[in-house]
Image (spheres, helix red, strand yellow):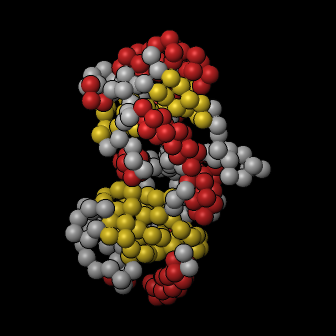
Amino acid sequence: MRIVRGYSDVGPEDRGACAAIGNFDGVHLGHRSVIEQARAAARETGAPLGVVTFDPHPRSFFAPQAPAFRLMNAEAKEHRLSQIGVERLFVLPFDAGLAGLEAEAFAAQVLAAGLGLRHVVVGADFCFGKGRSGSAQDLARFGPEIGFETTIAPLLSINTEAGPVSSTRIRQALSDGHPRDARAMLGHWHRIEGPVIHGEKRGRTLGYPTANLSLAGLHLPRFGVYAVTAEVLTGRHVGIYSGVASLGVRPMFGENLPNLETHLFDFSGDLYGAHLSVGLVEFLRPEQRFDGVEGLIAQMTQDSARARDSLAAL
């Protein structure tokens, strides 16, 4: 997958794509539905399959002090889109200039003239342009006049009573400690990705060494202990592992910066600096404080046994 940042200097090899447009936070099944329609159009015309997205997320631009809400960071999103076969990822810097473009100017200057798209696919609830004034129907109306076709993808529901699949519903499922419900909407386990960072190294002294990931900028699932599946993406230990992870602030040690500490089963090695992707499979218990290290170790042993049983049933 080639990543093109911006729209002012797009080379001829990256023009003419059929592209899905949106924020694609989580790359959930609704997003996949939009991308699959773009894939179908790309196959019909022999064009590259593209995705157009924004960085930072417009919500972060307009409300920078709001609580973190992203389901994935930019690197994780790029990884996921590459895995599903996207060939061109157009990342548009969302700044005051882009935010101030009227809807028709965005379609003409960015999508047509800038990126040279031949076909765009958007969800039925897509809005764009200054003040979110443009609708999917407006895009379909502008397109033929300025050089591209438009497909409007219906919203996807897997449970008609709950409504369409959305990043908001997925965040709520994770906040409630229901990773399997989140998976039903994502189409994959909710994953936290990033480089393994140095922690306090307490785990190794307790017999449970952990690989630590930062949660900075991400929506925080329910704090507690999870059965997890983990993939080491770079370094000497590339592979897929099972494990148990603690997500939270480690109340026993008086720390308050949330992170994810993952213990990989049947693993020995140094993962510092390696890129790790951890999928939350089952919520085992909430965070708790113990009277002493012995109680903590005993609980970690129970957690590990429960996690192994849970993962064996997959």
Residue 85 appears in the rendering = yes
What is the quadrant of the N terminus in the image? top left
Residues 82 and 245: in front is 82
Q: Position of residue 76 (x, y in %)?
A: 39, 51
Residue 69 appears in the rendering = no
Q: Position of residue 172 (x, y in %)?
A: 63, 52
Q: Is residue 84 left or right of residue 36?
A: left
Outermost residue, left side: 236
Instruction: Give me the residue at 36% from left, 83% from top.
Output: 266
Is 143 situated above or below 254? above
Q: Is residue 10 left or right of residue 225?
A: left
Instruction: Give me the residue at 49% from left, 28% from top.
Output: 120
Q: Is residue 168 left or right of residue 291?
A: right
Q: Position of residue 257 (x, y in %)?
A: 44, 58
Instruction: Give me the residue at 59% from left, 73% from top.
Output: 285
Instruction: Give me the residue at 31% from left, 38% from top.
Output: 3
Q: Report which quarter residue 135 is drawn in.
A: top right
Q: Is residue 170 left or right of residue 82?
A: right
